Amino acid sequence: MSRNHHCHLPSALIAYAPSLHAEAPPSQEAAPSSSKPQIRLSEVRKHGQNSDSKWVTKGTKVYDITDWIPGHSGGSVILRAEVYDILDSFYIGDVDPRGLVNGEVPAEQIDDPFQSDPSRDGRLVVHSERPFNAETPEEGLGAVIKPEEMFYVRHHLWVPETSAEGHRLVVELPDGEEREYSISDLRERFKQATVTARLQCSGNRRKHMSDESRSTNGLQWNVGGISTSEWTGVRLRDVLADAGFPVNDPPEDIKHAQFTGAEAYGASIDYGEVVVDLTEHP
């Protein structure tokens, strides 16, 4: 069973090595890109996802991110993220040219976490394919409630593979005790609630800033990084109460509820928001 999402009460495409094995004959050697040592793909494979020392590749460069991982949430997921801008100091060498095909690591031998991403509506204004980021087109901005296929999409990583049968919500209480809930549990054991909520990417209208002021980093969103919809689910306070947390009389040191998604990203909300019923106080 997968443990896809966590709720805590306080407590790039990187190609990781296991699937890299094709090697070109010596006649296809390419010049190394730096003075760093050349590393055979067979050696890179030894430092894959299940190794104590973890190496990753970008193009023909090899990075040792063993010391970087402990300070970043997400476990093995983070090994395949778009994080190269901060990994330069972990660059240790180049893939030996004898393992390359036409000067590149064979693409078919590189794990592709995006291959299972869902298909998207062709009307969306796409800013990047991998990870997929797209905004609602102008013709869709007039409606207050967006149909699902027209809702803007913001991803830092790929879409995690999961299923309604295997997905689990894990609630971790302050003392470390955990309770698991399946999708069926949430649907059958708790009262459902529906709220209307608007989401907006923090980079919405970044393009306007670049055009009218000065150049900005990041995806150049226009005005479509915002959408409103109706959301149906269960109240967090009900789940926490069922898990054994004293929702109406929390310990004084509890200030936030923290969330971690299957894609390794996390966020938190003030505990006061946990007990507010948005269906009664929009």
Image (tube, grey):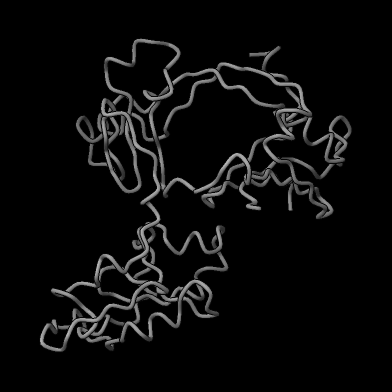
Furthest residue to the front? 165
121 or 83: nearer the viewer: 121
Q: Which residue is painted at 83% across and 40% down in the image?
A: 243
Left or right, 29 with respect to 242, comes to left
Residue 203: x, y in percent?
Answer: 37, 35
Q: Quadrant of residue 151?
A: top left
Q: Quadrant of residue 245?
A: top right
Q: Quadrant of the C terminus?
A: top right
Counting labels gives 0
Instruction: Examine the rendered structure and indicate whether residue 248 appears above or below residue 192.
Output: below
Q: Which residue is painted at 44% across and 28% down in the image?
A: 200
Left or right, 157 with respect to 242, comes to left
Furthest residue to the left? 27
Left or right, 159 with respect to 217, comes to right
Instruction: Examine the rendered structure and indicate whether residue 172 appears above or below residue 15.
Output: above
172 or 112: nearer the viewer: 112
Residue 143: x, y in percent?
Answer: 38, 10
Residue 270: x, y in percent?
Answer: 68, 35
210 or 68: nearer the viewer: 68
Instruction: Examine the rendered structure and indicate whether residue 139 appears above or below residue 241.
Output: above
Q: Which residue is painted at 71% across and 47% down in the image?
A: 170
Q: Which residue is painted at 56% across and 49% down in the image?
A: 262
Residue 250: x, y in percent?
Answer: 85, 37
11 or 263: nearer the viewer: 263
